[in-house]
Image (spheres, helix red, strand yellow):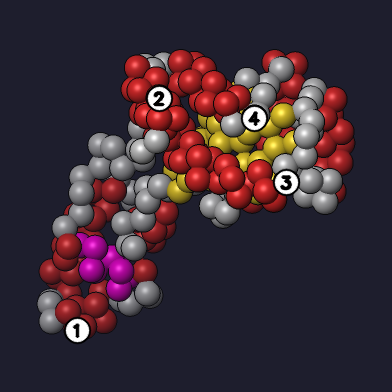
């Protein structure tokens, strides 16, 4: 760990509120040549009401416009970020399908930037964006700063999650290895009879475990149990 990362770690350790974390991440971003930063967290459970939490140093007028115009739903950086952990550099080509949003963002000085996500096993996805008003990102700059940028993405995610988000697994009773095994076979489409035969158990025992799985995950049927367990990474 170099002096730069040690300094950022120390400052983040003292941050207790999301705004304090943002202040420290913003300072680190500026030291890397970026004027602004933004962090977003997407929690996909429950499926019908996924939660998105956002905080940034952008102009508040742009933040309001972004939400009022529904740009969160079409932002190509978000579309990419919820699917991939590969870093994404902003470009005209990237925003071709959201040209109006891109024009408005640039009017607020958000012309050059990059974004990268962190994926949690429990289904949470955090994305850090860094932006500036000029000086295109060159390949040489990316090569030089990539280790620090990668580290900052992870550090920001950990710090924000500590302050503002609990895991979807919090409060759920952990599943036993046998329950997970049965749930995996259920996810593969096996019936209770088939699972019982595969595992050398009785159908009654398999159904007993399935009922306990549903209780532990707080769902009403085994299909919901499979869907939730898959999203939370329990079946991996």
* Label 1, residues with CA under 10 Å away: few <14, some 14-19, many ≥20: few
Query: Where are the magenta residues, as a range?
Result: 179-186
Q: Which residue is mark 2?
A: 7
The dot on residue 138 is 3
The picture places residue 127, in percent across and down from the top left corner, at: 55, 39
Rounded to the nearest angstrom, the CA distance separating label 1 from label 4 is 61 Å
The picture places residue 128, in percent across and down from the top left corner, at: 56, 36
Q: Secondary structure at mark 4?
A: loop
* Label 4, residues with CA under 10 Å away: few <14, some 14-19, many ≥20: some
The picture places residue 60, in percent across and down from the top left corner, at: 70, 15
Label 1 near label 2: C-beta < 8 Å? no
Q: Nearer the viewer, mark 1 or mark 3?
A: 3
Rounded to the nearest angstrom, the CA distance separating label 2 from label 1 is 58 Å
Q: Secondary structure at mark 2?
A: helix
Q: Nearer the viewer, mark 1 or mark 4?
A: 4
Whether residue 161 is visible here, answered yes or no, is no
| Residue 16 vertical placement versus 161 (above, below) | above
- Residue drawn at the location 20% of the way across and 54% of the way down: 175
- Whichever of callouts 4 and 2 sits on the residue coming sooner in the sequence is 2
The dot on residue 33 is 4
| Residue 212 vertical placement versus 77 (above, below) | below
- Whichever of callouts 3 and 4 sits on the residue coming sooner in the sequence is 4
Magenta: main secondary structure equals: helix
- Residue drawn at the location 48% of the way across and 20% of the way down: 24
| Residue 187 vertical placement versus 13 (above, below) | below
Rounded to the nearest angstrom, the CA distance separating label 1 from label 3 is 60 Å
- Whichever of callouts 3 and 2 sits on the residue coming sooner in the sequence is 2
């Amino acid at each position: 760990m170099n002096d730069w990362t040690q300094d950022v770690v120390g400052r983040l350790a003292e941050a207790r509120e999301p705004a304090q974390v943002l202040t420290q991440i913003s300072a680190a971003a500026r030291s890397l040549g970026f004027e602004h930063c933004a962090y977003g967290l997407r929690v996909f459970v429950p499926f019908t009401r996924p939660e998105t939490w956002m905080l940034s140093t952008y102009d508040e007028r742009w933040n309001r416009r972004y939400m009022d115009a529904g740009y969160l739903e079409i932002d190509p950086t978000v579309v990419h970020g919820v699917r991939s952990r590969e870093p994404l550099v902003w470009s005209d080509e990237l925003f071709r399908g959201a040209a109006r949003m891109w024009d408005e963002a640039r009017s607020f000085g958000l012309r050059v930037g990059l974004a990268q996500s962190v994926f949690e096993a429990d289904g949470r996805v955090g994305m850090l964006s860094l932006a500036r008003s000029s000086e295109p990102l060159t390949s040489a700059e990316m090569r030089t700063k990539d280790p620090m940028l990668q580290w900052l993405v992870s550090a920001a995610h950990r710090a924000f999650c500590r302050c503002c988000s609990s895991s979807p697994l919090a409060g759920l009773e952990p599943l036993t290895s046998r329950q997970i095994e049965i749930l995996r076979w259920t996810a593969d489409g096996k019936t209770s009879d088939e699972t019982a035969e595969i595992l050398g158990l009785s159908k009654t025992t398999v159904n007993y475990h399935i009922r306990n799985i549903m209780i532990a995950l707080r769902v009403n049927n085994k299909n919901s149990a499979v869907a939730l367990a898959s999203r939370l990474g329990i079946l991996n």
